[in-house]
Image: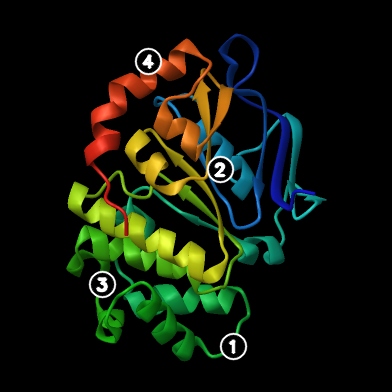
Amino acid sequence: MRDRILEIANLAIHFGSGRSRITAVRDVSFDVERGEAFGLIGESGCGKSTILRAVAGLNEYSDGHILFDGHTLPARRSRDFLRAVQMVFQDPFASLHPRKMVQTVLAESVRLMQMDRPQARIEAVLDAVGLPPQIRYRFPHELSGGQRQRIAIARALIVEPRMLLLDEPTSALDVSVQAEILNLLNRLRRERGLSYLMVSHDIAVIAHMCDRTAIMKDGHILETLSAGQLRAGDVSEAYTRDFLTASAPAVARRITPA
């Protein structure tokens, strides 16, 4: 029996009403197994980030169900859920408060989740993401893009989640730094038994990270591929084949294993 940590069934998301109503996601179903990295990939506007935000409780949905650990999620997410499921955003500079030191950013997460030993947790999580302890006294503008994204990951990890929602976590970074962050995320998943739901438009990133990948177009899933099928180009849909063909050079050279 499969051990699913996240289940999404017949999800539909609309914005606006009447003639201005837009269907961003239509009849989407998939699941993520415990400890798995599951990818959503497609062109900009295909609905992948909208799904991620719906799981986090940032987007409402009109139809379908989202279950975490076997329980249907209420419209207002509980503190237990917000501790268990953390999100890492695309732009690490925009997601960190520019006037707060790293120390304050990390301590706030501990306080909000009513956890103990904030200083010990800060030291441990900085070490886990490969940053020196003195960085806690710096502001976001004093850090490189890669360091900022490591802080964003640390902020998610410090509350000891079981799942991370990764919204294009490396797209704002230089290619060399992308590889470092992806290798870090892979290591953290192995060491902590985390589950990932990852959104990207970049096949190279998804191929490096994900056990299974859903190909999206116009708000729905065309097909779901294993990592082996993705790398071999073993696909059913013409759109997927064209997408992989256009991205093949990137898959071959962009990301190197940890």
Crowding at dot 2, Cα within 10 Å, few <14 / some 14-19 / many 20+, comes out as some
**Location of residue 101 with respect to 49 vertically, above or below:** below
In the rendered structure, which amino acid carries the disc numbered 2?
Arg
Q: Is residue 133 above or below residue 253?
A: below
Q: Is residue 202 visible?
A: no
Could you give the CA–CA distance between mark 2 and mark 1, rounded to whole angstroms?
29 Å
Earlier residue among tags 3 and 2: 2
Give the CA separation, mark 3 to mark 2. 27 Å
Helix, strand or loop for disc 2: helix
- Residue indicated by mark 4: 242
- Which percent across, then down, holds residue 102? 34, 75
Q: 142 or 233, which lies in front?
A: 233
Mark toward the start of the polypeptide (4 vs 3): 3
User: Is label 4 in contact with label 3 (beta carbons under 8 Å)?
Assistant: no
- Pair 4/1: label in front: 4
Q: Which residue is mark 3?
A: 139
Residue 143, image x and y in percent? 21, 67
Frontmost of labels 3 and 2 is 2
Q: Earlier in the sequence, mark 3 or mark 1?
A: 1
Identify the residue at image location x=45%, y=14%. 239
Disc 1 designates what residue? 116
Q: Amino acid at mark 1?
A: Asp
Q: Nearer the viewer, residue 108 or 149?
A: 149
| Amino acid type of the residue tagged 4 in the rendering | Asp
- Reading the image, the residue beneath label 2 is 53
Scheme by which the image is coloured: rainbow
Dot 1: few (<14), some (14–19), or many (≥20) neighbours within 10 Å? few
